[in-house]
């Protein structure tokens, strides 16, 4: 089940990372256009943007190479660092610059929806990112939205609340599916084992034509009752059939002799 889940999540993450790289490459040209006259700041921002591009590329390779849940979990967690690097990149803006909330919301949606992981590893990165965005919004930057600071915080908290609920429901659903899958596997194994035991008695059973003993797989000879008891769930109870009763236990009447 874990392997199947890793394959499904791996395809989703790979597709998302390819789409993430498009705006990241586009932002490199935007940085040059905005900070072309400030070479030191431009170099710092380009370095951060380059790192933000490198991490998803390495993460994509790691995700595609992951074949276990643990390896996949570590790879996705490393990819999330790309989102956190955006916090550092925001601090390189001049004080009082606008902080585009649409970028923050996009990163939150990607972390909650498109990077499935364990509950803790999927929830704490966007919560940490949200705390960083709120701190930057309060102390360093302004918003490009029409609302005030309280409105920005309310929107961020609302998105996080929805994201946490979605992750919790997904993890619970995956746990339920895994339990049912394991139960089905156990039932299937038990059925196959019972069928295999049944086939033992459906094959050719070598039996002595005189004493009716059965030859086992290792060459020993067992009583028929013992052989059947060891290969099935059946037990024997003894009685005397009418024919044997007449032959072996008929009364010895002198008049009959």
Image: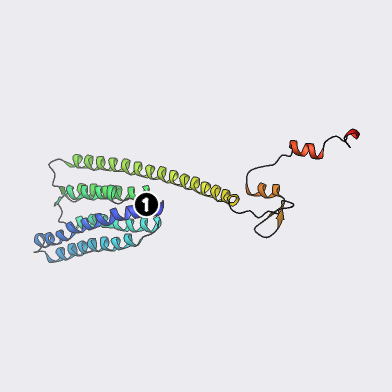
Residue 82 found in image quarter: bottom left
Left or right of 50 on screen, residue 39 = left
**Residue identifier under label 1:** 5
**225 or 49, which is in the foreground?**
225
Determine the residue located farthest toward the right in the rendered image: 254
Residue name at image x 79 percent, y 36 percent: 246
Residue name at image x 65 percent, y 43 percent: 234
Give the percent coordinates (x, y) of residue 164: 32, 43
Q: Determine the secondary structure under disc 1.
A: helix
Give the percent coordinates (x, y) of residue 163: 29, 43
Residue name at image x 19 percent, y 39 percent: 151
Left or right of 129 on screen, residue 247 = right
Query: Crowdedness of circle 1 by 10 Å Cα count: few (<14), some, many (20+)?
Result: few
Give the percent coordinates (x, y) of residue 118: 37, 49
Whether residue 172 is visible: yes
Left or right of 37 on screen, residue 135 = right
**222 or 68, which is in the foreground?**
222
Q: Quadrant of the C terminus?
A: top right
Whether residue 240 is visible: no
Residue 39 found in image quarter: bottom left
Left or right of 137 on screen, residue 76 = right
**36 or 79, which is in the foreground?**
79
Residue name at image x 30 percent, y 63 percent: 61
* Vertical order, 257 against 193 (above or below): above
Number of labelled discs?
1
Give the percent coordinates (x, y) of residue 177: 40, 44
């Amino acid at each position: 089940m874990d392997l199947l889940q890793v394959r499904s999540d791996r395809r989703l993450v790979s597709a998302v990372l390819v789409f993430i790289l498009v705006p990241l490459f586009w932002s490199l040209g935007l940085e040059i256009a905005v900070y072309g006259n400030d070479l030191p700041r431009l170099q710092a921002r380009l370095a951060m943007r380059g790192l933000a591009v490198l991490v998803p590329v390495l993460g994509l390779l790691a995700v595609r190479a992951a074949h276990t849940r643990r390896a996949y979990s570590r790879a996705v967690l490393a990819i999330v660092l790309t989102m956190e690097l955006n916090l550092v990149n925001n601090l390189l803006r001049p004080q009082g610059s606008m902080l585009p909330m649409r970028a923050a919301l996009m990163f939150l949606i990607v972390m909650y929806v498109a990077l499935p992981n364990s509950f803790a590893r999927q929830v704490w990165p966007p919560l940490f990112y949200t705390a960083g965005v709120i701190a930057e919004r309060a102390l360093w930057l302004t918003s490009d939205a029409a609302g005030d600071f309280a409105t920005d915080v309310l929107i961020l908290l609302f998105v996080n609340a929805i994201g946490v609920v979605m992750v919790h429901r997904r993890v619970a659903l995956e746990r339920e599916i895994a339990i049912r899958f394991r139960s089905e596997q156990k039932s299937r194994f038990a059925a196959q084992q019972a069928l295999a035991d049944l086939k033992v008695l459906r094959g050719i059973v070598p039996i002595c034509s005189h004493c009716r003993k059965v030859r086992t797989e290792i060459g020993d000879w067992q009583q028929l009752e013992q052989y059947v008891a060891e290969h099935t769930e059946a037990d024997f109870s003894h009685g005397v059939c009418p024919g044997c009763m007449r032959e072996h236990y008929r009364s010895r009447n002198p008049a009959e002799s």
